[in-house]
Amino acid sequence: MKLTAYLDGIGLIGPGLDSWPAARPILAGAAPYESRPLMVAAPQLLPPAERRRTGLAIKVALAMGQEACANGQLDATQLAAVFSSSGADNDNCDAICKALASEDRHISPTRFHNSVHNAPAGYWGIASGAMTPATVLCAHDGSFGAGLLEALTQVAVEGWGTLLVTYDMPYPEPLHAKRPLPAAFGIALALMPERSAQSLARIELSLADAAPDALAEPELEALRRAIPAARGLPLLQAVARGEGGRVVLDYLAPLRLAVEIEPCR
């Protein structure tokens, strides 16, 4: 079975990839890639009380969702949402583990509040005003592929425009030694059931067993291999280049996801 949708909006953030418009010429090969530290502002759409509670994971997730909706000229309140991350708020996880390992063992209410995997989806509902369904999932290194599969299934089965937000955060030590994610990274895709004037490409998804596509730029390929959310970069590269054809993305080994891309512009 093949799942089809139109890609109307993209959000992207990572080291040296400040946004989709900034990253597009880099992925297209028209500008060099230069890695630099990630800078993400607090989400201004949140009320001040909630804004103060947000960590990097929530900041990245909300920034991606807002950018994808803005680039696609879409109303967030009309979109279902799928949030996918291999670990979510890893700074918060580290802080809670340290508190539980201490003599005090008292956990900050804000830390506890943000400890659940669906916290970014809740903050998204507050920031965007969306009361549409939100799905939250995790599939370890296959989290980008699992999120894409879920989002396209909702488009195909329910006929909903669906916002996919995938993101990952680095762990502090000593957890970093066991799960070495080098940087925060996020990709958001606004997927629609019908073509519009904003549609960038028509994509069709199916399962495959071929090897996943790699990136020619060594530093970008290192990000793709190291960060689960970055496994979607070959898809974004094809869109940035305006290329049709097929890309193969990581999923749950030995399965892969084959994406057929037909540019709309």
Image (tube, helix red, strand yellow):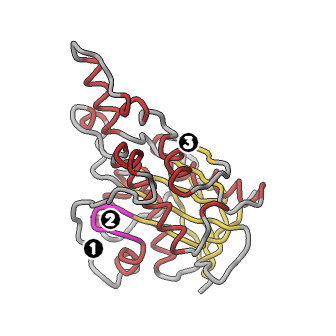
* Gap in angstroms between the C-alphas marked 2 and 1: 8 Å
**First reached walking from the N terminus: tag 3 or tag 1:** 1
Q: Are marks 3 and 2 in contact (CB under 8 Å)?
A: no
Q: Are marks 2 and 1 in contact (CB under 8 Å)?
A: yes
Please determine whether, in this image, residue 217 is positioned above or below residue 136.
Answer: below
Q: Which type of secondary structure does the marked residue at label 3 adopt?
A: strand
Task: Tell me the amino acid under the disc marked 3.
Answer: Leu
What is the number of the mark on residue 194? none
**First reached walking from the N terminus: tag 2 or tag 1:** 1
Is residue 210 shown in magenta?
no
Q: Position of residue 128 (x, y in %)?
A: 55, 58
Task: Tell me the amino acid under the disc marked 1.
Answer: Tyr
Q: Position of residue 233 (x, y in %)?
A: 44, 64
Please determine whether, in this image, residue 31 is positioned above or below residue 89.
Answer: below
Task: Tell me the amino acid under the disc marked 2.
Answer: Leu
Query: Magenta segment range?
Result: 13-19
Viewer-side residue, 81 vs 151: 81
Q: Which residue is mark 1?
A: 33
| Residue at x-position 45% and y-position 59% | 45
Q: Which type of secondary structure does the marked residue at label 2 adopt?
A: helix
Q: Which residue is mark 2?
A: 220
| Residue at x-position 48% and y-position 37% | 117
